[in-house]
Image (cartoon, rainbow, N blue to C red):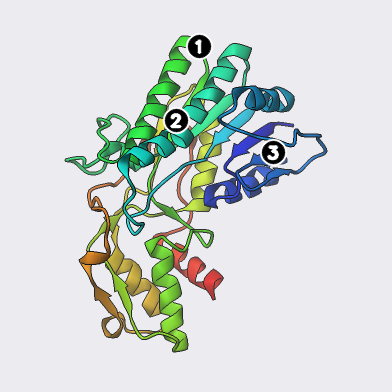
Amino acid sequence: MKKALIIGHTGQDGYYLTKFLNSLSYQVIGVSSKEIYTNFDITLPDKFDLQNKKVLYTFLDLIEADEIYYLAAFHQSSSDEVIDDGWLFDKSFEINTHAYINILQWIAEKKAQTKIFYAASSHVFGSPDHCPQTEETPLNPTNIYGISKVSSIHASAYYSKVHNVFASCGILYNHESPRRGDKFVTQKIIKNAIAIKKGSINSLVLGDLTAAIDWGYAPDYVEAFHAILQAPKPTNYIVATNQLNTVQRFVDITFKYLDLDPMQYVYQNSNIITKKLNNNLCGNNSKLITDTGWKPKVSFEEMIHLMIEAAL
């Protein structure tokens, strides 16, 4: 029976990955800033601290996981208030890079057979001049989040080459589910549309209806995480749908499902956007499909319907 450690198990991806690994009869340990989770009988330390190497190493020594999924991340959304760049660099590298490297170093020092998956992001490509992107597209981040993620991609390659660590990165494009946080535009659209349907509000204001996004379904994507660690060798994979959809189409599908006319309720105000969105981020998933057999199961429209039903 395989044993997996999920770092960041209470987030959207962690939640669905925990469910998926449970279905495969894995022994699962999940850790986050909120709690520690297990589905089997094991006595764990009271503390888990990614930044404290002694505490972290004690925890990893005890677990001896076959697979580690590093999903923890610090990210600023397009609707968040503007944060000081110096603080944002510190926080982003603390969670997105330094803590991850601590785990790579543990695997290297122990010469463990542990495989590790790192959740990277399409932001590593910045503003690419071609679409869709592949694993060969140059890494050229234009924001702090992307810079920190690129650093961990390079760290993964270094530890794989120099220390023979099985470290693979998934370059994840946007993925949604009923577990998506309320600050994201998808949930904003759905929950406000439901409120309009109930008569509690009479309008929805969005920043850019023309924004085009490669949106996938989170439960599909966590299956890709697992598939990537079953590949014969460590490498990077794009996890995406290879399809762009606009915010306007998301709105139209949502309002149609609720028997509403978006023209009567939805307005655009670009002033509410605090950072520029990239309309050219679309991922070519062919390498992942060829190497692992993974492919998305839930369509864009089906995903929205599932999210609406959950919200209702």
Q: Is residue 81 left or right of residue 61?
A: left
Tag 1's secondary structure?
helix
Q: Is residue 21 left or right of residue 80?
A: right
Could you say which quadrant of the image residue 304 lies in? bottom left
Question: Could you classify mark 1 by the number of other residues whose Cα lies within 10 Å: few (under 14), some (14-19), or many (20 or more)?
Answer: some
Q: Which mark is residue 163?
A: 1
Residues at marks 2 and 1 touching, judged by CB atoms closer than 8 Å:
no
Which residue corresponds to mark 3? 29
Disc 3 residue type? Ile
Q: Position of residue 132 (x, y in %)?
A: 26, 43
Could you say which quadrant of the image residue 285 lies in? top left
Q: Nearer the viewer, mark 2 or mark 1?
A: 2
Q: Position of residue 73 (x, y in %)?
A: 47, 41
Alpha carbon distance from label 3 to label 1: 25 Å
Establish if 286 lies above or below 99.
below
Disc 2 residue type? Thr
* Image quarter in which the N terminus is found: top right
Alpha carbon distance from label 3 to label 2: 21 Å
Disc 1 residue type? His
Task: Identify the residue at horizontal 41%, vertical 20% (top origin).
Answer: 157
Q: Position of residue 228 (x, y in %)?
A: 50, 33
Which residue corresponds to mark 2? 97
Name the N-terminal-most of marks 3 and 2.
3
Name the N-terminal-most of marks 2 and 1.
2
Alpha carbon distance from label 2 to label 1: 18 Å
Residue located farthest toward the left when viewing the structure as drawn: 129
